[in-house]
């Protein structure tokens, strides 16, 4: 199937979703899909809608129905070449380019967050993923599999440390200000006044990091060991002294605006500088006066060979230089007469746009004009990486891809979080595309576009009924990759003769009949049994995870939970849920019991959790008649009531 055909089919399904008022991308009931196929087919009551895109809509619906049937074991996909199954499960395996925006979706416990590590590395380091897949294919023992996973995770952690991968979890209070940009109140450490500064959110700062280009650099490698590193501000980008930075870059020096215009040549310590201030009649507020502190650092503590990091506000840096000479006084200050304290500098790096502070620091810059950067705030590893020779052309830097992993993407208010960027993340609207767009951001008033080397990977839990579904606008911009339960991963795990894979498989078949496939149980809940296949561990999993999840799924309808666990086929001593026969109407309502209807009351049988037969009875041990009774009871009307 060609990419154009897939795009046409997605557009067709979106069209039919709007027409019928249902999100077809989440519809997995075969009978409903069959009814829609008749409705939109040629000769159907809504054939005009099915004819959308020269019957692309109707054909897309047919392929979607076949795909759902394939997943549920009730049909096949007869496409030539890459199948719809491979397209929905892994675009790369279907011969398609990796999507810029993708969402891994599925029931709880199917390894969605776990898979984001592999998905991220498939973008940034596919060779490592290839090695991992090859190692898994040949691994025999759990130890070998664990070692392969550890190697993969180590590479992931390394890329996170290099700020090429970021991880964030959406929640109801997560906002546009957290994701894109917002205002933050800060106190100026010199004046003591409150000022509001635009702070980049996690997505905007990652985009700027991906879009940064080195506009000036030295080719010779630099050893940073033993060097003192200073942070310095060269004018305020929003103030009247904004041109100081350009002057310093062009002329190869740094300028300090403190000192009252005095010449401190010959001063070798703090006391000498204080005396020169006093001789000029410039008052100092004490030994901590910043006029005194900053000039002392600049004229006496700063040495040849030290490094200077030039900040751009508190959250970005725009240049790195090396001090090449002693302090001097600038004799012709020009327009900015306060900037007369000078030191010669060899500029090692200049960035445009400015580089986010996370590329160098573990915390933001301070408001002070000049101070020494030290560990743990300064990351020496990141500094060495920044000073390595880099390609300066746009084509080379565009290969430096970045990945943002958004866990639980449907838990946040998508419209509120993305704002106007919901349009810009679309592949055709990214920077460099034929239909590229940019917007002016509300706080910074800066033009902003999304680079084509920033990838979004989201995860979505399909079973959480407290969440609203994603709107069609977001669905159209993301590729959805299903993460179904994989009981086959547990087929080799047995606990006292109970095959865990088969047990999970049967439970999920029952849940699919009673509810739908979106509420199945994930294999991840049972994966600890690979290392510890004991009855006590299995008991803990059922007590702490499986039973609470089934209660949530079925709104505490205990009888249906019994059907999932096959308790109706077991004796009471090994059934997880049993009828509480102690609650009798005659004893509770003497004299009027005939007027009341007795309904079963259920209770947990705590002793069953520690019995092998309780788990063995889940997958088997029932007669055909009992199976027919359980299936017949799971009628569509009752499923709706649940």
Image (spheres, grey):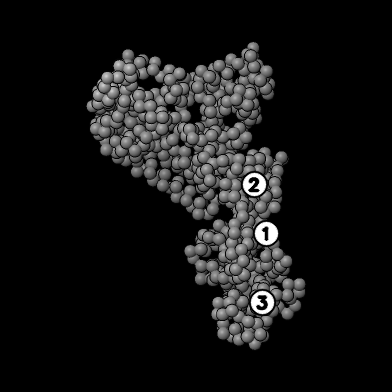
Residue highlighted by disc 1: 215
- Would residue 552 be seen by someone viewing this image from the given angle? yes
Residue 34 percent coordinates (x, y): 54, 17
| Alpha carbon separation for disc pair 2 and 1 | 18 Å
Tag 1 near tag 3, CB within 8 Å: no
Q: Which residue is mark 2?
A: 451
The relative height of residue 624 versus residue 578 in the rendered view (above or below) is above
Q: Residues within 10 Å of mark 2 (few under 14, many from 20)?
A: many
Q: Quadrant of the C terminus?
A: top left
Residue positioned 71% across, 70% down in the render:
251
Q: Secondary structure at mark 1?
A: strand
Report the residue at 66% width, 40% height from top: 423
Q: Please identify the quarter of the rendering in which residue 52 is found.
A: top right
- Looking at the picture, does residue 329 appear above or below residue 607? below
Q: Is residue 278 above or below residue 530?
A: below
Q: Position of residue 178 (x, y in %)?
A: 57, 50
Residue that carries the numbered disc 3 in the rendered image: 341
Residue 109 percent coordinates (x, y) = 42, 36
Nearer-N-terminus badge (2/1): 1
Residue 250 visible in the picture:
no
- Rounded to the nearest whole Å, what is the CA distance between mark 2 and mark 3? 40 Å
Classify residue 483 as left or right of residue 337. left
Tell me: 202 left or right of 510.
right
Q: Which of the pair 530/562 is nearer the observer?
A: 562
Nearer to us in this view, 225 or 243: 243
Q: CA distance from mark 1 to mark 3?
A: 26 Å
Which label sits in the foreground, 1 or 3? 3
Residue at (33, 21) in percent of width and height: 599
For label 3, the SS is strand
- Secondary structure under the numbered disc 2 in the rendered image: loop
Q: Residue furthest top?
A: 43
């Amino acid at each position: 199937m060609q990419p154009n055909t897939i795009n046409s089919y997605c557009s067709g399904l979106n069209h039919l979703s709007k027409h019928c008022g249902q999100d077809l991308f989440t519809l997995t009931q075969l009978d409903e899909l069959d009814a829609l196929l008749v409705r939109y087919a040629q000769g159907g009551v809504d054939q005009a809608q099915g004819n959308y895109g020269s019957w692309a809509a109707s054909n897309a619906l047919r392929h979607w129905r076949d795909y759902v049937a394939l997943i549920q074991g009730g049909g096949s996909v007869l496409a030539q070449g890459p199948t719809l199954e491979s397209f929905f499960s892994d675009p790369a395996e279907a011969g398609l380019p990796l999507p810029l925006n993708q969402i891994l979706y599925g029931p709880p416990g199917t390894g969605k967050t776990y898979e984001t590590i592999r998905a991220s590395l498939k973008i940034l380091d596919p060779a490592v993923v290839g090695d991992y897949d090859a190692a898994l294919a040949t691994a025999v023992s759990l130890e070998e599999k664990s070692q392969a996973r550890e190697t993969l995770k180590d590479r992931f952690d390394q890329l996170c440390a290099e700020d090429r991968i970021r991880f964030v979890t959406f929640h109801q209070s997560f906002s546009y200000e957290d994701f894109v940009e917002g205002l933050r109140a800060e106190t100026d450490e010199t004046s003591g006044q409150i000022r509001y500064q635009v702070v980049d959110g996690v997505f905007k700062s990652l985009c700027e990091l991906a879009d940064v280009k080195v506009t000036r650099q030295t080719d010779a490698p630099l050893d940073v060991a033993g060097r003192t590193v200073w942070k310095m501000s060269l004018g305020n980008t929003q103030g009247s002294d904004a041109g100081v930075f350009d002057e310093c870059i062009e002329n190869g020096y740094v300028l300090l605006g403190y000192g009252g215009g005095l010449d401190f040549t010959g001063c070798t310590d703090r006391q000498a500088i204080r005396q020169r201030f006093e001789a000029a009649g410039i008052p100092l507020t004490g030994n901590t006066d910043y006029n005194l502190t900053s000039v002392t650092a600049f004229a006496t503590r700063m040495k040849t060979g030290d490094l200077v990091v030039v900040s751009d506000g508190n959250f970005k840096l725009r240049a790195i230089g090396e001090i090449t000479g002693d302090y001097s006084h600038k004799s012709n200050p020009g327009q900015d007469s306060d900037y007369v304290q000078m030191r010669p500098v060899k500029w090692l790096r200049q960035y445009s746009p400015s580089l986010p502070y996370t590329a160098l620091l573990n915390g933001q810059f301070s408001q002070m004009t000049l101070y020494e950067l030290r560990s743990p705030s300064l990351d020496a590893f990141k500094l060495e990486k920044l000073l390595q020779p880099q390609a300066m052309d746009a084509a080379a830097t565009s290969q430096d891809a970045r990945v943002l992993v958004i866990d639980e993407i449907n838990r946040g208010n998508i419209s509120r979080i993305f704002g106007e960027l919901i349009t810009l993340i679309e592949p055709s609207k990214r920077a460099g595309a034929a239909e590229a767009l940019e917007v002016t951001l509300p706080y910074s008033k800066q033009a902003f576009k999304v680079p084509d080397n920033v990838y979004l990977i989201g995860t979505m839990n399909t079973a959480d009924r407290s969440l609203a579904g994603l709107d069609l606008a977001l669905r159209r911009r993301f590729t959805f990759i299903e993460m179904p339960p994989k009981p086959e991963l547990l087929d080799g795990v047995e606990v006292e003769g109970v095959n865990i894979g088969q047990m999970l498989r049967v439970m999920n078949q029952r849940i699919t009949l009673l509810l739908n496939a979106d509420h199945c149980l994930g294999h991840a809940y049972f994966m600890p049994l690979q290392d510890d296949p004991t009855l006590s561990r299995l008991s803990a999993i059922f007590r702490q995870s499986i039973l609470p999840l089934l209660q949530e799924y079925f709104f505490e309808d205990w009888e249906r939970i019994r059907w999932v666990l096959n308790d109706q086929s077991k004796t009471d001593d090994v059934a997880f849920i049993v009828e509480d026969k102690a609650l009798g109407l005659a004893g509770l309502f003497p004299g009027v019991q005939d007027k009341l209807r007795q309904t079963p009351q259920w209770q947990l049988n705590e002793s069953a959790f520690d019995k092998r037969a309780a788990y063995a009875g889940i997958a088997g041990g029932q007669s055909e008649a009992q199976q027919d009774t359980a299936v017949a009871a799971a009628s569509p009307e009752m499923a709706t009531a649940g």
